[in-house]
Amino acid sequence: MDTAEQRRRMVERHVEARGVHHAGVLKAMRHVPREAFLPAHLAEFAYEDTPLPIEEGQTISQPFIVAAMAEALELGPEDRVLEIGTGSGYAAAVLGEVAREVYTVERHRSLAEQAESRLKSLGYRNVHVLCGDGTLGWPEQAPFDAILVSAGGPNVPSLLLEQLAPGGRIVIPVGSDLRDQRLLRVTKKPDGTTSTEDLGGVRFVPLIGAGGFPEGVGAPKPTTPAGPASPIAHLIREACQPITGIDDLDLGPLLDQIGDARVVLLGEATHGTSEFYRMRTRITAELVMRRGFNMVAIEGDWPDAARVDHHVRGLKFPLRDDLTFTRFPAWMWRNREVVELITWLKSHNEVVEDPRRRVGFHGLDLYSLYKSLDAVLHYLDDVDPKAAKIARERYACLSPWERDPALYGRAAITEGYARCERPVVDVLRDLLEHRLDYAKADGDRFFDAASNAHLVAAAEEYYRVMYYGGPASWNLRDQHMFDTLERLLSFRGPDSKAVVWAHNSHVGDARATEMGAARGEHNIGQLCRQAFGDEAFSIGFGTHTGTVAAATDWDGPMQIKRVRPSHPASYERLCHDAGVAAFLLALRYPARDSVREELGSPRLERAIGVIYRPETELQSHYFQAALPWQFDAYVWFNETRAVEALELDVARAEIPHVYG
Ligand code: SAH
């Protein structure tokens, strides 16, 4: 596709679609070649709607923002415009196409000179560049009809207001905290008074100068330059173990690093990538056969996983008759790759004499409130009908909310409304009090029922806490996963060892990410490290591009989506630049100390969950992390493909006992 066509599409999808209508601005956006304002290695991203790094640690603004700001200036063809923060010169060029004259000021000499020569060679005779402190304005050329400030200051510089003509508009990001800026439009009325409008939250580099922040505010930490030739990409290439094939990869070195760990956590960067599943199956099989691991615990529902467990361990107790892995997102556990895992576990277990050594399969998540509640009642109906009657009355408290448990959370915080906390905890307590009697008949079956009762109690709290937002509900969910894991390990005895399958965002130590550091969220990876120390080993997974199974909205249909090539400032991009199609990288015991040091300063990392929105990828899917602190090892597949999701009847035909 030629660049004019790319620009046309960008404007249509990211600028017009989001509400910019100013004809002059749209025309300019379709015309200015953004790639000419970027460092050469980033030119391929010119028409992604994202800000990008330029020289001097600055950024070129996101196209949509440039358009929205230009529109907010209400420019006419006769206007004289002042811009503060030339940067790459891109916004100045856009303004130059809409207004009569543009005066733009940049404090970094190298940027000012570079922008000036670019603008000149592209033929912008009406754009004038000055190197200096833009918070002082450009008095010789004042007054201006419009002023655009492309960097965020603590307030609106007074000298800029002075240089505004009556009727003129300033658009400027303002905020004393760089993470919390508002885009303001200040209009000067003919009588000299001003009015201010808030146009929304934004994020810009700091405005540094007499009327802005002091030098050094928001200064970027020096990071090693990126690109295929960068020393860090080279280091990864040298330190990694290439993966030529998932099935014949030598896992000896990884097993050495894992040592005597009791818990190995296997992550995934998406919930729908085939390679991640297949590699985890391979590692799991190795841990089972060579290290005596005897359970797999997944980020999935307990009752659904219990069916798999029943199948692979050949348990005998009667199962409740309901469907498995049918709720959204069904593709996560009803796919070809998981069928292969289950088939392997089954055939492995069949030749293990000692039932205690057979590999179990369990769910750690808490989204099955009503299924679990039914399972508890079903169990009690069988073993203790009197207790079942009491439990049924207690659980009835939750029954009005079955269709939308989140509504229960809202109702429960309304004063005077009966909360179900007491009754669900009472059911659990009664069940545990009868542990000895109940477990006598069938320990596995009792454990299954107790786990469901624990889940109901945790989920009841989860939905209540969720209503308040913040980190509490996330923390409760991961705490539940961890507690369930601990109960499993103690139930299966001191020799038991678990492999956990969950998303990177659960298994990587949250303290090494923005979630932990800034939002106070913890996760199962962190809790395992805190509880098991070196006996917890966490492996992250990543990809550069390819296809993925994901939905656009919660409960929406599964789609096969293209994964956008990784962001230039991300870990994924470093791995891509290493130029090895797939690899294993040791982080706890790196081949060289420099691996931890070089990779240790925070970068962007991508997380794709059950929802993937490529259009807003940077905002919705990237976060800051310090990879070597997050994981003990990292598995990389440069190009990946979506899991093969299975229709219910196909899955049924494969393993009727599980999916039937
Ligand atoms: N409009 C630019 C965005 C550049 S980012 C583009 O389209 O590429 C903001 C720029 O403001 C940076 O280059 C930064 O160096 C510059 N800047 C910050 N404070 C400044 C000041 N007081 N005077 C002039 N430029 C400033």
Image (cartoon, grey):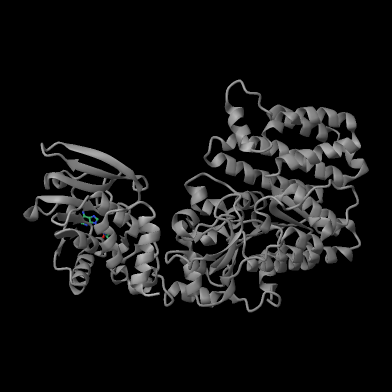
On the image, the x and y values in percent for residue 484 come to: 72, 46
* Vertical order, 410 against 62 (above or below): above
The front one of 338 and 361 is 338
On the image, the x and y values in percent for residue 618 come to: 44, 58
The residue lying at 32 percent from left, 59 percent from top is 61
Q: Quadrant of the C terminus?
A: bottom right
* Residue found at the very far left of the displayed protein: 140
On the image, the x and y values in percent for residue 622 come to: 48, 57
Does residue 534 appear anywhere in the picture? Answer: yes
Q: Quadrant of the N terminus?
A: bottom left
Classify residue 417 as left or right of residue 441: left
Residue 33 sits in quarter: bottom left
The residue lying at 88 percent from left, 64 percent from top is 350
The front one of 31 and 312 is 31
Q: Give the total number of marks visible in the rendering.
A: 0
The residue lying at 75 percent from left, 29 percent from top is 396
Residue 77 sits in quarter: bottom left
* Residue found at the very far top of the displayed protein: 416
The front one of 321 and 361 is 321
Point out the quarter of the image occupied by ligand 1. bottom left
The residue lying at 11 percent from left, 48 percent from top is 163
The front one of 237 and 345 is 345
Does residue 535 appear anywhere in the picture? Answer: no
* Vertical order, 465 against 273 (above or below): above
On the image, the x and y values in percent for residue 76 come to: 17, 54
Classify residue 411 as left or right of residue 304: left
* Vertical order, 466 against 597 (above or below): above
Classify residue 136 as left or right of residue 611: left
